[in-house]
Amino acid sequence: MIFFDIDTQVDFLEPDGALYVPEGITLHGAIGQLLGAAQTHRVTTISSRCAHEPGDPEFMQFPPHCLEGTRGAERIFEELPGLPRHEIPVEATLASGAPGHFEAGHHYVVRKKAFDLFSNRWLDGMRQRGAFQGERCVVFGVATDYCVRACVLGLAAAGAEIQVVRDAIGGVAEESTTRTLTEWEAAGVAWTTTGEILAELSTSPATNLS
């Protein structure tokens, strides 16, 4: 099992954030429980981190947000002290010396400048190597109709077994969120809840990516 923790940052999940997702504050409890369980049960976790600079192309579509060095770019749950941490820069690649495989029970914080988590060349390289083929991937975070959508569809294309945590995601707009859910259904994505994941982890000692 791998957790995919998508863009759980101040600018998206705090009401005063630059690009606040409606009702994002209500997701803190579920996300915190999932990440806490990742520490306790040593679940390999990949956290995306939107990491922008002034003038980035994405600001032609959305207001500036998650600017490096600002509070808005900070992750809500910054540290997972129970898991060894790896910071993966935007420009990282397998050839540049970034990790060549996932370590069980480690935390990978992957920076990106676009919706799609796989715009990070290192993570895309891992995907092309088949790192997610047949792997159970549990996805949560924001926003359902943008960055979470891209992550889920990217994992589906990679042959992953995907579960989305229903009570730990939030969308920007009703129409685009509904369209996204239809896409996921067509891609064979399954639903789960925070409670179901926590219950499973409490009774299953071996859930990590090996």
Image: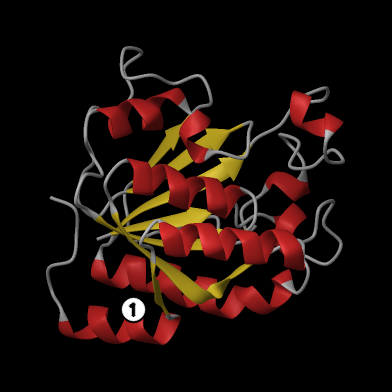
From the viewer's side, name the closer residue of 165 and 181.
181
From the viewer's side, name the closer residue of 187 and 113.
187
Q: Amino acid at mark 1?
A: Ile
Q: Quadrant of residue 88?
A: top left
Please give left or right for residue 136 compared with residue 176 in the image: left
Query: Which color mode does the image show?
Result: secondary structure
Say whether residue 99 is visible. Answer: no
For mark 1, give the secondary structure: helix
Q: Which residue is labeled 1 in the image?
A: 197
Q: Could you tell me which quadrant the N terminus lies in?
A: bottom left
Say whether residue 25 is visible. Answer: yes
* Rendered position, 27 above or below 133: below
Give the x, y percent position of residue 39. 34, 66
Residue under the point 44% across and 36% down? 87
From the viewer's side, name the closer residue of 118 and 174.
174
Please give left or right for residue 130 compared with residue 190 in the image: left
Residue under the point 43% across and 80% down? 194
From the viewer's side, name the closer residue of 138 and 175.
175
* Rendered position, 107 above or below 204: above
Give the x, y percent position of residue 149. 55, 52
